[in-house]
Image (tube, rainbow, N blue to C red):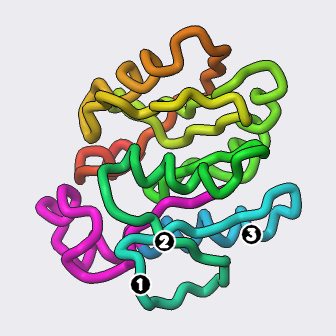
Amino acid sequence: MIVFARAPRLGAVKRRLARDIGERGALRFHRCTLTRLARALSADRRFRTLLAVTPDRADFRLPVRLPRIAQGHGDLGRRMQRAWARFPRGRVAIIGSDIPDAGPSDLAAAFRALGRADVAFGPAEDGGYWLIAVSPRRPARPFSGVRWSSEHALADTLANFRGRRVALLRRLRDVDTAADLAKL
């Protein structure tokens, strides 16, 4: 289980949200959501949980300790594929850190889905996805041509998994703007 997150730094996280609620509010939201998710996942012994951080050498503390790995450079797809490469033979899930309603039961559902599918997605309300879980049977270029941060991200990624068995989990809302926050 890999939690993808930006280092909690003022002005560097949740920039669209910060335009609406200010940089301090966006930082507070990011830190709280990341801490809650990290705490819940690390307490669940069904998973080995890692934190994939950007920037790579970021030094920060959270109330919960998780082993950290660097995301590296490139777009989100390149960084996720790099994280998967660390576990070529196992099942791997990557989850975003801005999904307040996500928790261990969602990860358990994703790994259960991999019993019958090659990939599981947690679709987001905005057309993206908050989680992707993969079996060892992965396409060579799973994120080719994906229009990140758009309503096409999930559809573009699904196209790269054509011919594979796909499972969809529950649809959740990620928080990118104050309007998203107000809908929670």
SS at circle 1? loop
Of all residues, the one furthest to the right in this rendering is 45
Mark number displayed over residue 70 = 2
Is residue 56 among the parts visible in the rendering? yes
Mark number displayed over residue 121 = none
Please report the residue visible at 45 percent of the width from the left and 21 percent of the height from the top: 160
Disc 2 from disc 3: Cα separation: 18 Å
Is residue 99 among the parts visible in the rendering? no
Q: Which residues are magenta?
A: 1-30
Please report the residue visible at 42 percent of the width from the left and 46 percent of the height from the top: 184
Q: Earlier in the sequence, mark 3 or mark 1?
A: 3
SS at circle 3? helix
Disc 1 from disc 2: Cα separation: 7 Å
Residue receiving disc 3: 42
Q: Would you place residue 1 above or below residue 142 in this image? A: below
* Label 1–label 2 contact, CB within 8 A: yes
Disc 3 from disc 1: Cα separation: 22 Å
Of all residues, the one furthest to the top in this rendering is 163
For the residue pair 27 and 70, the one nearer the viewer reads as 70
Mark number displayed over residue 57 = 1
Q: Would you place residue 100 above or below residue 71 in this image? A: above
Picture quadrant of residue 57: bottom left
Label 2: few (<14), some (14–19) or many (≥20) C-alpha neighbours in 10 Å? some
Picture quadrant of residue 166: top right
Residue 139 spot, x, y in % from top left:
56, 27
Residue 77 spot, x, y in % from top left:
40, 44
Residue 169 spot, x, y in % from top left:
63, 28
Q: Would you place residue 141 above or below residue 101 in this image? A: above
Query: Of circles 3 and 1, which is in front?
Result: 1
SS at circle 2? strand
Disc 2 residue type (three-letter):
Ala
Q: Would you place residue 49 above or below residue 64 in this image? A: above
